[in-house]
Image (spheres, rainbow, N blue to C red):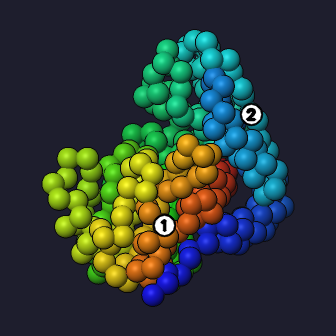
């Protein structure tokens, strides 16, 4: 059996086309251009690439965008005063601070200082609480991307046994809530889970997000399961791989996301969707 490849690039392009059309209509009807501000502190090369891609996506969809690249030694209060200014700027509907931040800056303080209605990453405690209640404006971009991929491929989590491997605030926890909202039965596994394979082996859908190369092995996966790989790891030879051992698993799974080209392209696309939502909410 060979798994169906869940193509994130293809789904992402079709969602972006739709967002582009929605944005054109919104701009015509309201005279408002959705605006996103991205703040990058320091010189992490991976973060710099993400920021460039976000700026490019804004241009492509028809958003206004501002990028702030601040030096590594920027003080916390300088970042907070920039965010206060962006909070009050009517041209800016979404604010995103690229993580990780240099050690002198407390990420919790930064997240708290962004107005919830401009928090397009959905990390502010108010937005996290809204997700818990199922009454949200925005969803964290990666878990929302996973749900969009499942939907695009007709994979309905309702009544399914779903296992999320990883419990981060950015992916694991919100992913579990979104699957639960779609009527799945959800187990969250993590580094302290005893006998992880006993959980993953009975899952109909596995979402793996642990940041360890090829961590999920084929003998941990039930034949016919769907495997969604959120991980992105660079191997010593420079190649990228996910948290799932792709080749052997694709022999037994019914569907699997590749790395790169699976969940990754969806993350920035969902950020664009959140920014358009924020702009729409601002004119309500």
Instruction: Give the residue drawn at x 37%, y 78%.
Output: 225
Instruction: Give the residue drawn at x 79%, y 48%.
Output: 56
Q: Position of residue 189 (x, y in %)?
A: 26, 56
Give the quadrant of the N terminus: bottom left
Instruction: Give the residue drawn at x 68%, y 72%.
Output: 10
Instruction: Let me know if residue 271 appears in the view.
Output: no
* Residue for badge 1: 246
Quarter occupied by residue 61: bottom right
Q: Is residue 279 left or right of residue 120?
A: right
Comparing marks 2 and 1, which lies closer to the viewer? 1
Q: Residue furthest bottom?
A: 1
Secondary element at image label 1: helix
Q: Which mark is residue 194?
A: none
Q: Position of residue 182 (x, y in %)?
A: 37, 73
Q: Position of residue 169 (x, y in %)?
A: 38, 44
Instruction: Give the residue drawn at x 36%, y 70%.
Output: 218
Q: Is residue 83 left or right of residue 169?
A: right
* Residue for badge 2: 67
């Amino acid at each position: 059996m060979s798994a169906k490849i869940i193509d994130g690039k293809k789904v992402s392009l079709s969602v972006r086309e739709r967002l582009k059309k929605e944005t054109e209509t919104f701009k015509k009807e309201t005279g408002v251009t959705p605006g996103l501000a991205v703040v990058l502190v320091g010189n992490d090369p991976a973060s710099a690439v993400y920021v460039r891609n976000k700026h490019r996506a804004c241009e492509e969809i028809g958003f206004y965008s501002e990028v702030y690249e601040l030096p590594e030694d920027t003080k916390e209060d300088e970042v907070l005063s920039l965010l206060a200014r962006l909070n009050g700027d009517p041209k800016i509907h979404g604010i995103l601070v690229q993580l990780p931040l240099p050690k002198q800056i407390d990420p919790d303080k930064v997240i708290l200082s962004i107005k919830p209605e401009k928090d397009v990453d959905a990390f502010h405690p108010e937005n996290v609480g809204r997700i818990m209640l199922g009454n949200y404006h925005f969803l964290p971009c990666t878990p929302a991307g996973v749900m969009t991929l499942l939907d695009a491929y007709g994979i309905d989590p309702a009544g399914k046994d779903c296992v999320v491997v990883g419990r981060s605030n950015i992916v694991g926890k919100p992913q579990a809530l979104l699957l639960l909202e779609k009527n799945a039965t959800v187990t969250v596994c993590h580094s302290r889970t005893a006998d992880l394979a006993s959980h993953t082996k009975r899952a109909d859908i596995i979402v793996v997000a642990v940041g360890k190369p090829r961590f999920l092995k084929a003998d941990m996966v039930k034949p016919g399961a769907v495997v969604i790989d959120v991980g992105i790891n660079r191997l010593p030879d420079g190649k990228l791989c996910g948290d799932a051992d792709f080749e052997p698993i694709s022999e037994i799974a019914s569907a699997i996301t590749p790395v790169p080209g699976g969940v990754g392209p969806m993350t920035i696309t969902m950020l664009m969707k959140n920014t358009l939502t924020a702009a729409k909410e601002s004119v309500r």
